[in-house]
């Protein structure tokens, strides 16, 4: 990969490669755009097939955070980290502390939190080295694991998408096929189960499937069968790019609404969903609950306030559908438009001359 070509193509601000021989840390922090404020986005730990795949993931995820934070109305930019390694085998306290020092070196330009493969305990280790970390243990006045709040937002967004597709936002009796029953999806299933949805689950981790199948009377299926199953709603809640050339013609659902980041492998897959009349709730709109939750820590955390704020996802998803219908554009394009307009308006107003402490002229006596 020609890294500067890639950075220029999507206008990335900065990419930081971090290594610590002692602990085995190999991390990539990607900062996409800080027009709206410091970049906030989680840290993913994953076994990547190649270093190039890790860089690509960090870049895609960071750009997604810029759009997610902008569309959610947060005064935050977009960034993300990937740590190369197996979260079950390669973690050690020194690794997260070394990573925490790298975050501290960015002096507030980047704030992290959990993502796939990282936990509240990992964030607590990072916190030993820097304050620029959220989702740490509640005893520090923090919000802990963001996943239940992400799940609540996905549930709200799924209801809005159901209303669009079926004329009612009730999920009672609807069949929802959930791919990946990790932190977010387990909590999502709790909401679905309470509302009387029929749940189908799959995961590459057999224990995770068993736990969800037992708790929610869900039907367990093999990972590859999720695309062929008869269902009303497909909820991708594992990794990205599951809507692709191989899967798109197999999906029978009328609605796609799930927590995974970067669900569309390529933009053309969003166009294809639009042509097929499948109601797609754009990933970074529907899964913004987690970041709304951790962002609240920056002002002194209040759970009740957060749960109210997260309900905005229902309205944001509706707004996307309205823009999509009015302009006859795919929903992912409508979402991009909403986010880009907010960033552009802030960027334009920042072009005004400001005599603040950062401007050379303000130091003149
Ligand atoms: N945790 C959060 O608050 C947020 C998470 N997300 C996104 O939601 C998704 C899920 O996140 P978490 O629940 O936190 O992660 P997790 O790691 O707890 O759960 C992911 C699950 O997907 C399973 N999985 C991986 N590949 C699979 C495959 N090919 N087929 C079936 N299952 C597979 C894993 O075994 C795991 O159980 C990720 O894409 C994440 O980036 C987005 C916003 C916030
Ligand atoms: C803090 C996380 C929940 C934010 C993030 O990385 C995401 O929304 O993907």
Image (cartoon, rainbow, N blue to C red):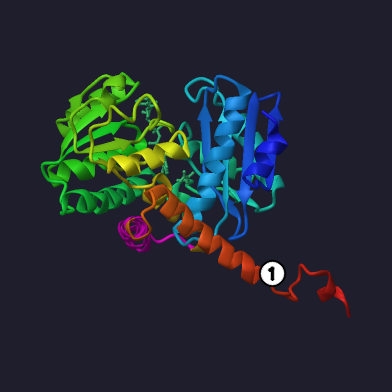
| Circle 1 SS class | loop
Tell me where residue 351 sits by quadrant. Answer: bottom right
The question of residue 57 being in magenta is answered with no
Position of 188 relative to 201 (above/below): below
Magenta-drawn segment: 300-324
In the figure, is residue 142 to the left or right of 215?
right
Residue occupied by mark 1: 351
State the image coordinates of residue 160 (x, y, percent, origin top left). Answer: 26, 54
Report the predominant secondary structure element of the magenta stretch.
Answer: helix
In the figure, is residue 357 to the left or right of 35?
right
State the image coordinates of residue 74 (x, y, percent, origin top left). Answer: 49, 60
The question of residue 307 being in magenta is answered with yes
Residue displayed at 29% across by 39% down: 276
Position of 79 relative to 228 (above/below): below
Say few, some or many: other residues with alpha carbon within 10 Å of mark 1 (under 14 / 14 to 19 / 20 or more): few
Residue displayed at 58% across by 40% down: 126
- The residue closer to the viewer here, 51 or 132, is 51
Residue displayed at 34% across by 61% down: 326
State the image coordinates of residue 42 (x, y, percent, origin top left). Answer: 52, 42
Would you say residue 192 is visible in this rendering?
Answer: yes
- The residue closer to the viewer here, 327 or 336, is 327
Q: Quadrant of the C terminus?
A: bottom right
Would you say residue 294 is visible in this rendering?
Answer: no
Tell me where residue 209 sits by quadrant. Answer: top left
């Amino acid at each position: 990969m020609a890294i500067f070509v890639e950075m220029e193509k999507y206008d990335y601000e900065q990419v930081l490669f971090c290594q610590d021989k002692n602990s085995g840390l190999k991390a990539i922090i990607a900062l996409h755009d800080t027009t709206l404020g410091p970049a906030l986005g989680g840290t993913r730990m994953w076994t990547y097939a190649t270093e190039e795949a890790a860089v690509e993931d960090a870049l895609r995820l960071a750009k997604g955070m810029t759009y997610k934070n902008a569309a959610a109305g947060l005064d935050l930019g977009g960034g993300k980290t990937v740590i190369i390694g197996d979260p079950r085998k390669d973690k050690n306290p020194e690794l997260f502390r070394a990573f925490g020092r790298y975050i501290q070196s960015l002096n507030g330009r980047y704030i992290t939190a959990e993502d796939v493969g990282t936990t509240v305990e990992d964030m607590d280790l990072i916190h030993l080295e820097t304050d620029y970390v959220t989702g740490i243990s509640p005893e520090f006045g923090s919000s802990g694991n963001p996943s239940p709040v992400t799940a609540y937002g996905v549930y709200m967004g799924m209801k809005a998408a159901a209303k669009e597709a079926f004329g009612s936002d009730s999920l009672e009796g609807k069949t929802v096929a959930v791919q990946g029953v990790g932190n977010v999806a387990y909590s999502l299933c709790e909401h679905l189960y309470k509302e009387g949805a029929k749940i189908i689950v799959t995961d590459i981790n057999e224990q995770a499937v068993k736990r969800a199948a037992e708790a929610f009377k869900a039907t367990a299926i093999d990972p590859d069968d999720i695309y062929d199953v008869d269902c009303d709603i497909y909820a991708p809640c594992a990794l990205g790019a599951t809507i692709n050339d191989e899967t798109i013609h197999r999906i029978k659902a009328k609605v796609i609404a799930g927590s995974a980041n970067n669900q569309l492998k390529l933009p053309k897959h969003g166009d294809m969903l639009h042509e097929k009349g499948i109601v797609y709730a754009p990933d970074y709109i529907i899964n913004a609950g987690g970041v709304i939750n951790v962002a609240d820590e920056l002002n002194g955390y209040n759970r009740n306030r957060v749960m109210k704020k997260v309900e905005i996802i229902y309205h944001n998803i509706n707004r996307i559908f309205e823009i999509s219908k009015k302009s006859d554009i795919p929903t992912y394009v409508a979402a991009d438009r909403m986010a880009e307009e907010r960033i552009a308006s802030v960027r334009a107003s920042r072009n005004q001359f400001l005599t603040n402490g950062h401007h050379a002229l303000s130091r003149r006596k």
